[in-house]
Image: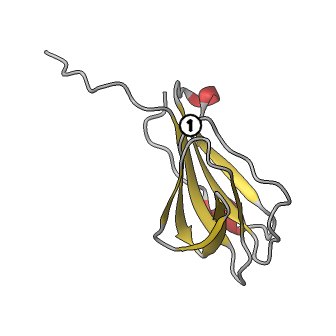
Amino acid sequence: MEFLRRVDFERLGATSEKVSQQLLGYGSGATSCLVTCTKTPPGEDPPAATHAYRVDQLLYVLSGAMQIEIAGDTHEAGSGTLAVLPAGAPFRIWNGGGDPCVYLAVICTEPQPVVQLVG
């Protein structure tokens, strides 16, 4: 398993299209979470439908801003903002601004209690 993962900012910046990089998932050794880095272009319209996950999702905005509708309320999440999307809450996200938005998405289950290893 690769313990350190790097975001390919060069690839994200090389296109004006929406692009995602999976940093961790079932195909790369994860057993209980998914981590992606996504760049969305400016001026994106909100998706027509909302969706929800069975587990909590976190979105951390690295640069730019995104609009998030959570359970019917719309918010703007700027750079440095952590958006918490609770399990089962309907949501949709988009970039209605003038600059690209780059964010990390983390979807995972509740971790097991920490076990102290005796060596």
Label 1 packing within 10 angstroms: few (<14), some (14-19), many (20+): some
Nearer-the-camera pick, 53 or 119: 53
Nearer-the-camera pick, 30 or 55: 55
Q: Within the image, what quadrant is residue 14 found in? A: bottom right
Q: Within the image, what quadrant is residue 18 found in? A: bottom right
The percent position of residue 71, horizontal first and vertical second, equals 64, 57
Q: Is residue 95 above or below residue 112?
A: below
The percent position of residue 65, horizontal first and vertical second, equals 61, 75
**At numbered mark 1, what does the secondary structure look like: helix, strand or loop?**
loop
Q: Residue at x 69, y 68 (%)?
A: 13
Residue projecting furthest to the front: 72
Residue projecting furthest to the left: 119
Q: Residue at x 54, y 66 (%)?
A: 61
Q: Which residue is mark 1?
A: 55
Q: Is residue 3 left or right of residue 51?
A: left
Q: Is residue 98 left or right of residue 105?
A: right
Q: Residue at x 51, y 74 (%)?
A: 79
Q: Within the image, what quadrant is residue 67 found in? A: bottom right
